[in-house]
């Protein structure tokens, strides 16, 4: 998943990297120490598994393209089996923003809360002068 995130960030940077766009990204991976894990099966036999590191990372990105109206951001962090995050994006209609808070772990699964906020667009008045 980490590699997919980095690819997405690279694609977003290339596609939206022109004069009318702004994008930023931040990825921080926390590397732990190699640690063996032992467990016993139902017959009492001990088994050894390599466990390379405690999974822990944090990333965020933001894109604002005023030319196309594309505006979105995401922040996510993982610590072990717990993942928490938030993303928001302006809907294609330009009138609302979707806000999603999510979390997941091995005990309760994945849960997301989705909210929408509405933007009121005031049309510009055009004044035509007649000479």
Image (cartoon, grey):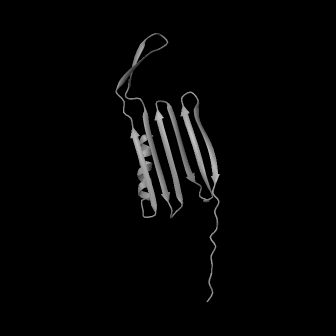
Is 8 displayed left or right of 101 in the figure?
left
Pick whichever, 129 or 32, lies toward us.
129
List x then y, in percent, for residue 25.
42, 49
List x then y, in percent, for residue 14.
41, 57
Residue 48, placed above or below residue 23: above
List x then y, in percent, for residue 6.
41, 46
Residue 37, placed above or below residue 95: above
Residue 126, placed above or below residue 49: below
Residue 98, placed above or below residue 52: below
Pick whichever, 96 or 15, lies toward us.
96
Q: State the quadrant of the N terminus.
A: top left
- Taking the spot 63% from the left edge, 78% from the top edge, the residue there is 127
| Residue occupying the far bottom of the picture | 131
- Quadrant of the image occupied by residue 16: bottom left
- Taking the spot 36% from the left edge, 33% from the top edge, the residue there is 31
Pick whichever, 130 or 107, lies toward us.
130
Report the number of discs. 0
List x then y, in percent, for residue 128.
62, 81
| Residue occupying the far left of the picture | 34
- Taking the spot 55% from the left edge, 34% from the top edge, the residue there is 104
| Residue occupying the far top of the picture | 44
Q: State the quadrant of the C terminus.
A: bottom right
């Amino acid at each position: 998943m980490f590699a997919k995130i980095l690819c997405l960030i690279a694609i977003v940077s290339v596609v939206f990297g022109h004069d009318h766009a702004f994008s930023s990204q931040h990825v921080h991976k926390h590397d732990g120490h190699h640690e063996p894990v032992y467990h016993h099966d139902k017959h009492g036999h001990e088994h050894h598994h390599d466990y390379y590191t405690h999974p822990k990372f944090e990333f965020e990105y933001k894109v604002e393209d005023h030319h196309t109206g594309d505006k979105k951001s995401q922040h996510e962090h993982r610590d072990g089996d717990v993942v928490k995050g938030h993303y928001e994006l302006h809907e294609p209609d330009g009138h609302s923003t979707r806000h999603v808070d999510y979390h997941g772990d091995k005990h309760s699964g994945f849960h997301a809360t989705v909210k929408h906020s509405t933007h009121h667009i005031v049309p510009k008045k055009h004044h035509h002068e007649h000479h």
